[in-house]
Amino acid sequence: MVFYLLYYGIESFKFKQKDFQELLEQARSRNEKLNITGKLIYCEGTFIQVLEGEEQHVKEVYASILRDHRMVATKLVTEGKVEERHFGAWSMDFKEISLATINDFENCTHPDVADYINTAPAIKLLKLLGK
Ligand SMILES: Cc1cc2nc3c(=O)[nH]c(=O)nc-3n(C[C@H](O)[C@H](O)[C@H](O)COP(=O)(O)O)c2cc1C
């Protein structure tokens, strides 16, 4: 079983390209050492991230993230255990998405999509948004 944790938080200053680069280099190198995988999504100043791996390691990294001054108002959404990793190929996949994309999902009238948005487990939704 693999432990996962999903949270969101708000940037404490306007992130530029070099800030993302620095953050991802740091995150990926530590994640590789701890065998943590996951996905980070950024949209208009908000980060949403799933971390997966050994419970103690994931909680350690999350504790660091909570102390990180680059982000404020961090809030845990959900945590739990799954059979297999969802993001096994990524020490930290990253995607920036626009508000327009999210609005498109929200406004989509196809019943299957609307239903999915309302009922999807958080990780599946994250994958969908990050496509
Ligand atoms: C949005 C965001 C996502 C982050 N993701 C990770 C991550 O996946 N893995 C990681 O080791 N650090 C991540 N960090 C960096 C940590 O907050 C922290 O700076 C780093 O792990 C070093 O920890 P330390 O200051 O306790 O030594 C992230 C920071 C931010 C702001």
Image (tube, grey):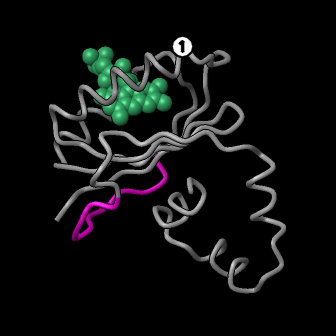
Residue 57 relative to residue 8: left or right:
left
Q: Position of residue 85 (x, y in %)?
A: 27, 60
Of residues 26 and 118, the one nearer the viewer is 26
Residue 125: name its quadrant. Answer: bottom right
* CB of mark 1 near ligand 1 (< 8 Å): no
Q: Amino acid at mark 1?
A: Lys
Q: Specify the segment rendered in magenta.
A: 76-86
| Residue furthest out toward the bottom | 111
Q: Is residue 60 magenta?
A: no
Q: Position of residue 78 (x, y in %)?
A: 43, 57
Check the image and report above or below for 45 versus 85: above
Measuring 75% from the left and 64% from the top, which residue is drawn there? 105
Residue 98 vs 22, above or below: the answer is below
Examine the rendering and report whether any part of residue 65 can be seen.
no
Mark 1 highlights which residue?
18
Place residue 44 in its image quadrant: top right
Residue at left 53%, top 57%? Answer: 126
Residue occupying the point 47% across, 45% down? 7
- Is residue 43 in sight in this rendering? yes
Q: Main secondary structure of the magenta part?
A: strand
